[in-house]
Image: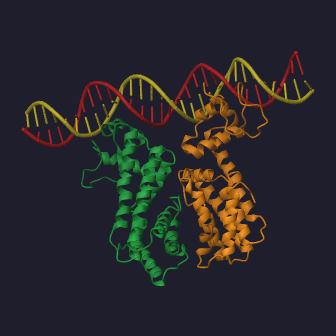
Chain colours: A green, B orange, C yellow, D red
DNA sequence: CGAAGACTAGACAATTATGTCCAATACTAT
DNA sequence: ATAGTATTGGACATAATTGTCTAGTCTTCG
């Protein structure tokens, strides 16, 4: 009765999921992720997922020991995508601090390398699970440390590098309303101010212009 | 078996809730609010609430038509406490803009008039319910309009008043980790910067000093 | 071709939730 | 006191969810 509607598979070349279906462990994880993002961790339930995948509910237990086993895998998957992506961007070589910040900014504007909704969803989840909260805080420490190191590579003193790292990082999380259209545009406008206005200094005009051009380029589809 | 543990009642002079208990509609709402804050709306379930109140599950249906009826009442209660409190603070007369901002700041530091965790919880809830989201957005518009009007009363031009209002308001919501200890202190430190650094101007030193003194006074127990 | 392993469907059991109904009890006003 | 109302407890019905078990089907590989 239920239509198989897999939202995204690993390998699109695989046979379509109709008739006698076979799904992968990653298919279950992807559906779980979608539901986590849209409806919260409480709604990650086995029967609705199996309906969506078009397979029997009991097949789930071949791939996962239990619902908790799936949730653990989902959290692990989050760490290995979002946190890893942010750290990679922050650690990449850069010829100026503006260039470096632009690279980190990639994570805010390019959903393919960093999923903001996924981050929000995990944050919500963390409020209700000690284990997830511990993982989240550890990840945040790693992320901020990577950004701090980035500033330090561009000769900012340790304390100021940490302050700027925190502002740059938390700026991304200023809204927790995933449906709001405004956040991205608003964030982009505020980046130079947050980054340069906080300590009392101001950004050189050409750096602000660089930011604006960069944001526009990404929004119009280019990926510098 | 379950101990009756009402967390807070309307009228403490009432008989303690032991033995043959009678609870009020507000008791149910208070428990629902506590659970909403600590565990999310999904966990607001009737059986656990009745256990906590020490009454039978079916008694619930005397006070509320259904679970949804309770949730509607809970959302209504939120509007009539938090939003009303913030608007009241923003609308109160003030002899300077610093004084006015200090008054709004009351909502960040005094849990008795404005519950930040309650606000966070409703925000989470809104992500999963169109109805709640509509109410939340309407409330935010009302709040920001009140703060904007406050700045306008102190002779800020309309656009700048709106910008400052948004910053002052969203500053409160920069963190959505209700368990973190840091947010309050961090927010307090950043208030002057957010408020005065954004448009390129800077706060007079005496206003920053006023903020600091104000925050310290509240933290040490005084309520100016 | 045929067997072993990978994967799925469906039946069964246990738990927890919502909601209804009615009898029983406690409180209040006369 | 007692009648009437307010409030509660427990039985019943229904649905959703997790998990187990087993028989069966599909795929792959010798």
The answer to whether residue A96 shows anywhere in this view is yes
Observer-nearest of A221 and B177: B177
Q: Residue at x 38, y 53 (%)?
A: A78
Observer-nearest of A163 and B155: A163
Residue B55, horizontal then vertical, whole percent? 66, 29
Residue A102, horizontal then vertical, whole percent? 40, 73
Query: What quarter of the picture does the N terminus of chain A occupy?
Result: top left
Residue B13, horizontal then vertical, whole percent? 79, 36
Q: Is residue B10 above or below residue A156?
A: above
Query: What quarter of the picture does the C terminus of chain A occupy?
Result: bottom left
In the image: residue A107, left or right of residue A190:
left
Callout count: 0
In the image: residue B149, left or right of residue B51:
right
Residue B133 lies in quadrant = bottom right
Q: Residue at x 42, y 50 (%)?
A: A135
Residue B33 lies in quadrant = top right
Q: Is residue B8 above or below residue A93?
A: above
Residue A60, horizontal then vertical, whole percent? 34, 39
Q: Is residue A215 above or below residue A19?
A: below
Q: Residue at x 34, y 64 (%)?
A: A88
Q: Residue at x 60, y 68 (%)?
A: B167
The answer to whether residue A7 shows anywhere in this view is no
Observer-nearest of A66 and B102: B102
């Amino acid at each position: 009765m239920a239509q198989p509607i897999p939202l995204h598979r690993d390998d699109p070349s695989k046979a379509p999921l109709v008739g006698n279906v076979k799904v992968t462990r990653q298919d279950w994880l992807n559906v779980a992720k979608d539901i986590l993002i849209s409806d919260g961790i409480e709604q990650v339930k086995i029967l609705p997922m199996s309906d969506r995948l078009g397979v029997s509910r009991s097949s789930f237990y071949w791939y996962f020991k239990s619902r908790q086993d799936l949730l653990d895998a989902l959290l692990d998957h989050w760490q290995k995508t979002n946190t890893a992506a942010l750290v990679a961007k922050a650690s990449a070589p850069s010829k100026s601090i503006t260039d470096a910040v632009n690279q980190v900014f990639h994570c805010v504007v390019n959903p393919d390398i960093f999923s903001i909704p996924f981050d929000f969803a995990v944050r919500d989840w963390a409020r209700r699970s000690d284990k997830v909260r511990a993982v989240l805080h550890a990840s945040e420490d790693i992320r901020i440390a990577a950004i701090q190191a980035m500033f330090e590579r561009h000769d900012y003193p340790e304390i100021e590098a940490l302050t700027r790292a925190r502002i740059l990082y938390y700026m991304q999380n200023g809204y927790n309303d995933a449906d709001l259209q405004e956040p991205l545009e608003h964030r982009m406008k505020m980046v130079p101010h947050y980054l340069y206005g906080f300590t009392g200094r101001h950004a050189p005009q050409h750096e602000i212009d660089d930011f604006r051009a960069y944001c526009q380029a990404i929004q119009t589809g280019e990926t510098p």
